[in-house]
Image: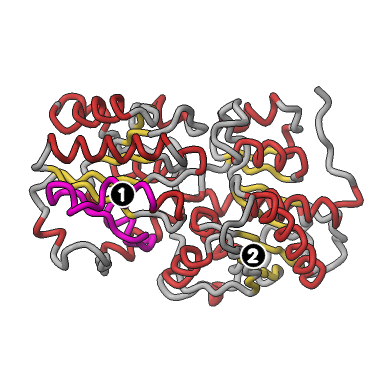
């Protein structure tokens, strides 16, 4: 396959002494993984950074921004009740085009595989503004799983100019699709950068988690806490119901364990979770609570015995804390954790979830084999590599002046 080349007309005018970079995000995972990039970019006095929140998950993204002391420069407020993917896409493209017209960036930075990411990339393509894709190259090879994320990231890769692959496997995926090797940079995943920054804050000031007992850490110190998250669109319907039924089964069969499920705001998630799991807390050891802050999630992850999830980010985060992960999906694009032994793909099957979770709860040997603390997704320096490559692409000097005052207190990347 012929490689995709970046047209010269897309490259910025290198005679300009200062470059503007637009960071666009819409969901909480995007914010978490872009915050280290934003903080690192703001350290350079020859860069101007403008941030745009589309509002795809407004309450959850606002919460993370507040935790890190960051305020979005622009909020598009795109969400509406019962909005279809087609309607969301149309609204995003329209409002992002207006934002980009005002911001006039030299480079657009996006992350991951959301509808916001796809639409921001499409906007950049229409405006002939280069796009840098953070977390590029993740693939399952199945456009239906995850849906629509797999299609989003494949399409973004066809249009982006810079591809920041978190792992060597992601780089190989991009090369196999004809992306030129000099446009791909293996950086590690910025989720590890964010996790290390946030963990320092959590350990210094343990967050309160609404919905849990005030003294939950002390009260459950000798309990095996299982953190549960399930919210992906592909899980809606029968798969999510089976996940909830599996948790109910595990709770009844393991009364000594505690199951904590922060539930996504989407009605397609809250409906079945509430119907199946919120009935009198199922033997009093299932806690269905509202979505927690990012710092709250880290506190739960650090305290957990293991994690049941269909999330992508948690597959990348939990290995840092040596927490086994059971992935309740048919396929994963983060195969590195499975290969490392810290994660296991069990699918959304009620029987499989119960069987594998019971094994971890009752077999010390099985647990020990999965409790691997090495994280295959990075060492906490991904954002520095990403910014270095962006600066090179924009024709900026490698050793320009740093503006360290731009870092908010406590947001040191070291």
Classify residue 73 by image quadrant: bottom right
Horizontal side, residue 57 vs residue 3: left or right: left
Q: What colouring method underlies this structural image?
A: secondary structure
Q: Is the residue 209 above or below the residue 136 in the image?
A: below
> Mark 2 and mark 1 in contact (Cβ < 8 Å)?
no
Nearest the camera: 412 or 206?
A: 206
Mark 2 sits on what residue? 78
Q: Which residues are magenta?
A: 271-300
At which x and y percent is residue 248? 22, 40
At which x and y percent is residue 130? 79, 52
Horizontal side, residue 246 vs residue 9: left or right: left
The residue under the point 51% across, 50% down is 190
Secondary structure beneath dot 2 equals loop
Q: Is the residue 146 above or below the residue 300 in the image?
A: above
Classify residue 157 by image quadrant: top right
Nearest the camera: 295 or 225?
A: 225
Nearest the camera: 172 or 19?
A: 172
Dominant SS in magenta: helix
At which x and y percent is residue 169? 56, 28
- Quarter of the figure with the C terminus: bottom left
Q: CA distance from mark 1 to mark 2?
A: 29 Å
Q: Is the residue 362 above or below the residue 136 in the image?
A: above
Q: Residues within 10 Å of mark 2 (few under 14, many from 20)?
A: many
Nearest the camera: 250 or 301?
A: 250
The residue under the point 46% across, 61% down is 413
Q: Residues within 10 Å of mark 1 (few under 14, many from 20)?
A: few
Labelled disc at residue 275: 1
């Amino acid at each position: 396959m012929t490689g995709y080349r970046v047209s010269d007309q897309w490259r910025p005018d290198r005679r300009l002494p200062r470059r503007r970079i637009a960071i666009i995000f819409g969901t909480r995972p995007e914010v978490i993984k872009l915050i280290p990039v934003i903080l690192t970019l703001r350290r350079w006095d020859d860069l101007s950074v403008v941030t745009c929140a589309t509002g795809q998950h407004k309450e959850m993204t606002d919460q993370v921004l507040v935790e890190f002391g960051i305020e979005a420069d622009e909020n598009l407020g795109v969400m509406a009740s019962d909005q279809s993917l087609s309607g969301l896409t149309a609204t995003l493209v329209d409002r992002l085009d207006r934002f980009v017209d005002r911001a006039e960036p030299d480079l657009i930075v996006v992350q991951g595989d959301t509808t916001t990411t796809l639409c921001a990339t499409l906007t950049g393509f229409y405006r002939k503004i280069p796009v840098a894709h953070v977390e590029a190259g993740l693939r399952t090879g199945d456009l239906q799983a995850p849906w629509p994320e797999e299609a989003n990231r494949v399409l973004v890769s066809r249009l982006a100019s810079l591809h920041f692959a978190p792992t060597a496997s992601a780089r190989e995926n991009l090369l196999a699709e004809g992306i030129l090797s000099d446009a791909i940079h293996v950086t590690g995943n910025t989720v590890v950068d964010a996790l290390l920054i946030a963990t320092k804050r959590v350990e210094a000031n343990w967050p309160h988690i609404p919905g849990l007992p005030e003294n939950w850490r002390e009260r459950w110190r000798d309990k095996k806490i299982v953190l549960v998250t399930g919210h992906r669109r592909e899980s809606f319907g029968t798969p999510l119901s089976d996940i909830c039924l599996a948790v109910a089964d595990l709770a009844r069969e393991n009364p000594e364990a505690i199951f904590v499920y922060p539930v996504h705001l989407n009605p397609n998630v809250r409906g079945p979770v509430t119907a199946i799991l919120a009935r009198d807390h199922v033997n009093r050891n299932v806690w269905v609570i509202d979505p927690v802050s990012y710092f709250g999630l880290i506190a739960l992850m650090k305290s957990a015995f293991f994690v049941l999830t269909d999330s992508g980010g948690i597959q990348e985060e939990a290995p840092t804390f040596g927490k086994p992960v059971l992935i309740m999906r048919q396929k994963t694009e983060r195969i590195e954790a499975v290969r490392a032994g810290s994660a296991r793909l069990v699918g959304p099957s009620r029987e499989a979830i119960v069987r594998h979770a019971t094994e971890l709860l009752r077999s010390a040997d099985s647990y020990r084999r999965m409790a691997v603390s090495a994280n295959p997704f990075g060492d906490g320096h991904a954002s520095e590599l990403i910014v270095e490559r962006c600066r090179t692409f924009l024709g900026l000097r490698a050793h320009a002046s740093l503006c360290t005052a731009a870092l908010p207190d406590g947001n040191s990347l070291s």
